[in-house]
Amino acid sequence: MTFRVSTDMERCQGHGKCVIQCPEVFDADEQGYVVVRAGEIPDSLRAAVERCVDDCPEGALGVT
Amino acid sequence: MGDNMDTTTSRGPGTGADPAPGIDMHFDHWSSKMAYSPYDVWARLRNECPVARTDKHGGFFVLSRYDDVFAAALNTETFSSDGDGLGVAIPPQDLRPLYPIDLDPPYHTRYRQILNPFFNMRTVARMEDSIRGLARELIAAFPASGVFDVAAAFTLPLPRRVGFQMLSFPEERTAEVSELVEAVMSNVVERQGAAAPRLFEVLSEILAERRAKPRRADLLDTVVFGEVDGVPVDEKQSFAMLILLLMGGLATTSAALGVMIECLADHPRSTAARCRRGRGCCSASARPTGTTGRSDGRTRCSSTGSRISTWASGSARTAASGRTWPSCRSRSPWRSCWPRCRRSWCMTTGRPTGWAASPG
């Protein structure tokens, strides 16, 4: 099973905490803002991604 | 003063003898109590009075629960960083507004954007080798006895050297600027005494010198010549950005480094495990000093990380103390205790807006 990650680019300020905590899923663009590496994320990464969602200081991430 | 406090927004136990819950605590983030041993105060606030009122600094409300602070940090309309021109600091500082932290979106975002290229992950990653080199140089100079003030030997000088390198500050100015920034940061309540005017003078000179020189693609150039929405920043904005970069780059970073070393020192076994896993916390030669590197100073962690800098002022002269994190006493590995630790005691991310609101 897989899931999707949503990003709110107006909120993202490029803290990069998600990239550090879960580089399998998150990357930073040239400016430092979040990029999600894949559309469908395997469920095995769900817990790690949910922690990133909780930890994002701007509330810019979501799981759908 | 406490007798006149409005109790309608308070949710504490609200006994008749306590008209404004929390008021009896006279909460003051600048007190030495909050600097040296804040955890029981935070615990009491969270448990008994999550929206507390204090009579200090003209009176303000204090949020202490993670969810409340987080929600307030994101709700910039209600909890403005601009604060009608007063800015985020309590009490309001003479040096304001500081760009960009004393701004609300969308202005905050725009000013932050011009600085982001110098601080985004890729840029910083390219600095890793040189920063590691500086760190190793400092570590190599640690006294062989293993007993020393890790702040003086490491957490203060490292960010200074990196920061001034990034800002390409004139070499002969860096010592004085470091001292002035520390003096300003450690004496906020008394309005910084003589240090603030002198810092203003020195930085104004540095900015003027740079303004007269040809453009070059570095951080100080952006501070002096940056444009927001096509409009060049003015001198006041340049100055405000530079001050903030110095406070963040020197004081906040020193304090954060001290907190990290303390946490690593308190969890030496999991530190070693992290190193083995190559998680990047340290290299073999930069191994934290365990229990030997502690100073007499104290590190403290506020409930909002953005305040770490100011509370740790005195400054990160402090660094690793001998205490353990109250919420990290379990035997669980550092990695698994850290999120809990961070959530309840040392959230390192929230914007200052969330932490306390000035009275309406």
Image (tube, rainbow, N blue to C red):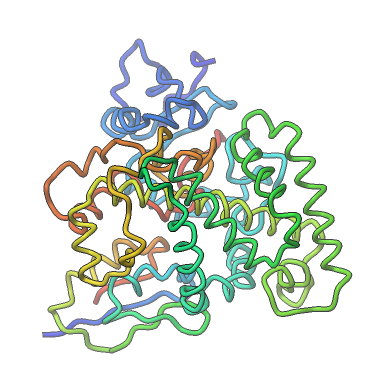
> Which quadrant of the view contains residue B20?
top left
Q: Nearer the viewer, residue B353 or B348?
A: B348
Q: Which of B204 and B263 is in front in this view?
A: B263
Residue B124 as seen in the image, left or right of residue B57: left
Residue at 13% in and 44% down: B330
Residue B207 as seen in the image, left or right of residue B11: right
Q: Where is residue B230 in the image (x, y as percent from the top left)?
A: 75, 77
- Which image quadrant: the N terminus of chain B? top right
Q: Which of B123 and A59 is in front in this view?
A: B123
Q: Position of residue B321 (x, y in %)?
A: 35, 37
> Which quadrant of the view contains residue B100?
bottom right
Residue A3 as seen in the image, left or right of residue B92: left
Q: How many labels does the image show?
A: 0
Q: Which residue lies furthest to the top in this view?
A: B17
Residue B312 as seen in the image, left or right of residue B281: right
Eyeballing the image, is B248 above or below B302? below
Residue at 50% in and 84% down: A30
Residue at 71% in and 72% down: B222
Q: Which residue lies furthest to the right in this view?
A: B212
Q: Which residue lies furthest to the front in this view?
A: B144
Q: Position of residue B159 (x, y in %)?
A: 54, 57
Eyeballing the image, is B296 above or below B216? above
- Which image quadrant: the C terminus of chain B? top right
Residue at 60% in and 61% down: B163
Eyeballing the image, is B311 above or below B234? above
Q: Which of B161 and A58 is in front in this view?
A: B161
Q: Where is residue B126 in the image (x, y as percent from the top left)?
A: 50, 79
> Which quadrant of the view contains residue B93?
top right
